Image: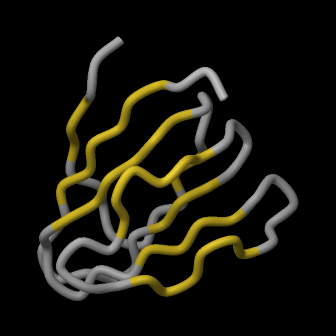
Amino acid sequence: MGWKSAQPNANVDYNVIINCLISVWGGTGVSVTVKDSVGTTIVGGISGPTPLSLVPLESGWAINFGNFGAAPTCRVVETRF
């Protein structure tokens, strides 16, 4: 499986269904929050030109990109961790 790219919608919790690596860049007003399977914040309010680079996400977690003005680009690849 190769890298897949997409642009998320604002203020949506995306449920992670596979173990993966994610990179996020671009957009305006992006604020990334990652929560584990019980809702504990793992990463909160990360922003900047490249808020995430090759960050591992586990199946059962959730990611939200905040109330951005312009959507960031996300690239995801499945991992075996």
Q: Is residue 68 above or below residue 75?
A: below
| Tally of marks | 0
Q: Position of residue 71 (x, y in %)?
A: 17, 67
Q: Position of residue 30 (x, y in %)?
A: 29, 80
Toward which corner of the image does residue 43 lie, by quadrant?
A: bottom right
Q: Determine the residue positioned at 81% across, 72% down.
A: 40
Q: Is residue 54 left or right of residue 56?
A: left
Residue 39 vs residue 52, the one in the foreground = 52
Q: Position of residue 56 (x, y in %)?
A: 55, 47
Q: Is residue 38 left or right of residue 78?
A: right
Q: Position of residue 64 (x, y in %)?
A: 48, 66
Q: Is residue 64 above or below residue 1?
A: below
Q: Determine the residue positioned at 49% across, 86% down.
A: 45
Toward which corner of the image does residue 26 lie, by quadrant?
A: bottom left
Q: Quadrant of the N terminus?
A: top left
Q: Quadrant of the C terminus?
A: top right
Toward which corner of the image does residue 42 lie, by quadrant?
A: bottom right
Q: Is residue 34 above or below residue 55?
A: below
Q: Is residue 5 above or below residue 9?
A: above
The scheme the figure's colours follow is: secondary structure
Farthest right residue? 38
Q: Is residue 69 left or right of residue 33?
A: left
Q: Determine the residue positioned at 62% across, 55% down.
A: 62
Q: Is residue 74 left or right of residue 1?
A: left
Residue 79 vs residue 29, the one in the foreground = 79
